[in-house]
Amino acid sequence: MINLHQKYNHYLHTDKKLDIQNIDERVLGYGWTDDGKDLTGYYVHTENHRLYFNLKDQYVRKEVWDEVA
C-alpha cells in the first residue's frame, strides 16, 4: 500500500512545489479514491489541479480545480 503521508506530507504547509505532469504548484491535500467498495487509487490536490493516480502509483488523469469544485 502506498503511504500518502510519507510521500506528500512534506509538501503541506511549506513553499515546496510538486513538479509533475507539467504542474509546478503547492500541494494543498491528498486522499484516496474508491469505487464505493474498494480503493482504486489516490489524488493529489494542488493550487489549481487535482491529479489522480492508480494503486500502482501510475498517473491516470488531471482535472482543473474549477471543474472539480
Image (cartoon, rainbow, N blue to C red):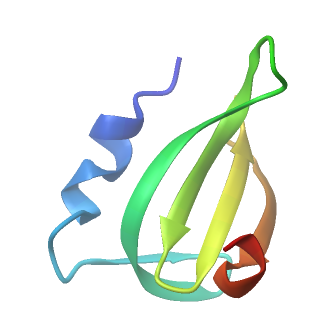
Which sits in the foreground, 23 or 45? Answer: 45
Say above or below: 57 vs 63: above
As drawn, the residue found furthest toward the front would be 69
Residue 19 is situated, as x and y percent measured from the top left of the image, at: 48, 78
Say above or below: 2 vs 17: above
Q: Is residue 58 left or right of residue 47?
A: right
Say above or below: 35 vs 16: above
Q: Residue at x 70, y 34 (%)?
A: 41
Q: Residue at x 49, y 74 (%)?
A: 46
Residue 56 visible in this rendered orientation of the protein? no
Q: Is residue 15 left or right of residue 53?
A: left
Q: Residue at x 78, y 80 (%)?
A: 67
Residue 60 is situated, as x and y percent measured from the top left of the image, at: 83, 54
Q: Is residue 49 left or right of residue 13?
A: right
Q: Residue at x 38, y 70 (%)?
A: 27
Residue 64 is situated, as x and y percent measured from the top left of the image, at: 73, 82
Which sits in the foreground, 21 or 50? Answer: 50
As drawn, the residue found furthest toward the left would be 14
Residue 36 visible in this rendered orientation of the protein? yes
Residue 22 is situated, as x and y percent measured from the top left of the image, at: 65, 87
Say above or below: 26 vs 35: below
Q: Quadrant of the C terminus?
A: bottom right
